Amino acid sequence: MKARRYCGTLLGLCLTSSAHAAPWNFEPTLDVTVAHGERVFHHLESAGRKSIAALGGTVAVVWEDNRDGSPRCYFANKTAAAEKFTRELQLSGTDECYEPALAALDGGRFVAVWEEAGRVRARVVAGDSVGDPIVLGEHEAAQASVGADGDVVYAAWAEKDGGFARITLARLAVDKTKLTVVRRAFPDSAAAKDDQAYPTLAPARSGAVVVAWEDRRNGHTFITQTFSSDGVQFAPVKQVNETRNAAVPTTTSSSRNLGRGPGAMRAALARHDDQRLVMVWMDKRDFLSGYDVYAAFSSDGGRSFGKNQKVQDSFGDNIAQWHPAIAAHGDQVIAVWDDDRDNTADLWLSWPEGAGWSDDMKFAGASGPGVQSHPGIAVDELGDVHVVWLDKADLDGPTRLRYARGRKL
């Protein structure tokens, strides 16, 4: 049952009754950047919660902060053996930058996307080398996301199409640190009737890609998903969060009797392997307690997603959850979010266990006094977990950008 919690100081963990099953031991937290101070504010707001990526012994983080008086986007990385992050590189140019996202490439490289001067841009980072930035879209755009599997790279964003924002996808080719756009496509072929926002995506080495986003065509926000084997032809869109009377078919075989719809937003998507994927999002179907974290799994490569599952345990049922993110690699899956069930805003972790999700776990450095929020998460090929988040002494105070690694036990 999920009615008991205790703390283990040796591991720096605070667990519910499934403590014996906790798969990771978290190390002491680190600052990602030395740029912090009284008037410095960092942001981790990437579409799909893709602010961190890890592969081949290196973890990297992207964020936006105002250290020079204007919002700029930055990148920093760290090898497993290093004691701290590198001095960061500025990704953006002289214009204001927002919502950077990141994906790991082979060969110790990363590809970053962001919004700058009303356009979505991208570039490759390899060590201390930064490739030339390119513009991805043709019109005003924002909310960029990116995904990579081997040398297969896709980016997605919300681009103005008439009066509404419409999700646009691009296949990108990478040659060392040079990026080019191979082709663009609209995952949803229907004419835009309201805004589509905050895409997330998961490519496969075969060239297939799954794309999901917030859709508002029903007069409320719901999560829409589609699949393509080549990034050109897309399957009809399906709704992932369970509701009734949807304008598009649900991806699940059953749906809850929720009337027009409860409101769902900010989906995040991760791939286990070629066939298995997992998605999380904020869902307000229990409207009296605010948003909950829900998840759904796919076992057919992303063509469809299964029954919705509530991720947080019963201790979190009466308060709102915020900013969920998800990571997966092989059989490792872990979700993270923030909520204030213990009277402070803390990060909470949960992972699949049995037919559902584990009791929730928090760890030292991302809990306790102050405000810990807006997490990003990645799992590397060793099964180690990497978490980045914002840390504030109080709700309106300046931020620090913090990171911790959870070693797989």
Image: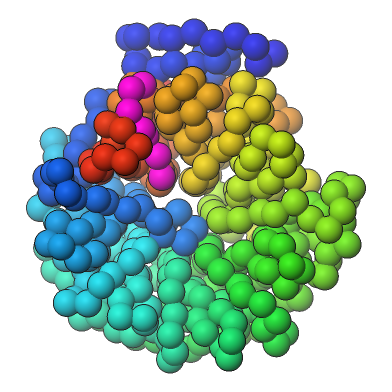
Q: Which residues are magenta?
A: 368-374
Q: Quadrant of the N terminus?
A: top right
Any magenta on residue 327? Answer: no
Q: Is residue 201 above or below residue 277?
A: below
In this view, the residue in front, 313 or 78, is: 313
Any magenta on residue 371? Answer: yes
Q: Where is residue 252 shown, x and y percent of the image?
A: 81, 54
Badge count: 0
Q: Is residue 219 above or below residue 287?
A: below
Name the outermost residue toward the front. Answer: 396
Q: Is residue 5 left or right of residue 71?
A: right
Q: Is residue 267 left or right of residue 114?
A: right
Which corner quadrant of the image does residue 199 belong to? bottom right
| Residue positioned 49% across, 8% down in the render | 6
Q: Where is residue 175 shown, x and y percent of the image?
A: 28, 79
Q: Where is residue 372 shown, x and y percent of the image?
A: 37, 34
